[in-house]
Amino acid sequence: MSVTTGLFYAFSGILLFAAFRVITARNPVHAALYLVLTFFQAALIWMLLKAEFLSIALVLVYVGAVMVLFLFVVMMMDVNVENLRLGFWKHFPFAALVGVVIALEMAAVLMGGFRIVEDPSVVVAPGVSNTKELGILLFTQYVVPLEVAAAILLVAMIAAISLTLRPRKDSKYVSPGDQVRVKSRDRMTVVKMAATQTAPTVTADADAEKKQ
């Protein structure tokens, strides 16, 4: 067994364990951390397949942005785990059936590729960067789908911001223009108050001493 094959089995084993812990961990923060570990192992497997761009994109986009944001949201929110577990066993049979169907579909698609043993017909010349080739392909042959995907993501981002900033009764929205135009004297007001002196309190022991 070669070193590459050994690394593949090691990364795959850790990935399967981390993915299993994502759905079995009781703490949401621990589940998010296991998902980060899963992404890292998938990135390492892609690195073994010489897909450097996909590997780095997975680490930067999902681990560096999406999962970190998700982790901070989970940590800041007071997630009631007990309420999330209500009705788990009631919906478990249907969820298990859906999971088995998805696993069988993926196996039917992937098993055909596992039986391919001949060498690929396309030979990559040494010193060629697949990231560069992928960029050239995206911005030439697939430039229209790329622009459409970028427009869809832009519309989704604008819609999310608009839904967040819409006026609501429970919203704590503050106008950015008012924040920029605010002055230091508007933030704090010094109130001058007359000095007051509280009357001394007499305890029960002091009253007893006076009576004696």
Image (cartoon, grey):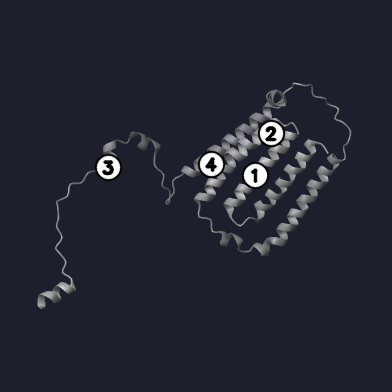
Tell whether label 3 touches label 2 (CB within 8 Å): no
- Please name the residue shown 57% across and 39% down the image: 65
Mark 3 lies on residue? 188
CA separation in Å, label 2 and label 3 = 52 Å
Looking at the picture, does residue 171 appear above or below residue 1? below
The location of residue 10, given as percent across then percent down, is 74, 43
- Please name the residue shown 81% across and 36% down the image: 2
Mark 4 lies on residue? 160
Neighbour tally class for label 1: few under 14, some 14-19, many 20 plus, Cα within 10 Å:
some
CA separation in Å, label 3 and label 4 = 34 Å
Neighbour tally class for label 2: few under 14, some 14-19, many 20 plus, Cα within 10 Å:
some
Which of 131 and 140 lies nearest the eye of the viewer? 131
- Please name the residue shown 14% across and 52% down the image: 195
CA separation in Å, label 4 and label 1 = 29 Å
Q: Quadrant of the N terminus?
A: top right
The location of residue 137, given as percent across then percent down, is 72, 25
Single out the mark in the foreground, 3 or 4.
Answer: 3
CA separation in Å, label 1 and label 3 = 48 Å
- What kind of residue is marked 4? Ala
Instruction: Please give the count of numbered marks on the rendered protein.
Output: 4
- What kind of residue is marked 2? Leu
The location of residue 83, given as percent across then percent down, is 57, 61
Mark 1 lies on residue? 37
Is label 2 in a helix, a strand or a loop? Answer: helix
Mark 2 lies on residue? 54
- What kind of residue is marked 1? Leu
CA separation in Å, label 1 and label 2 = 16 Å
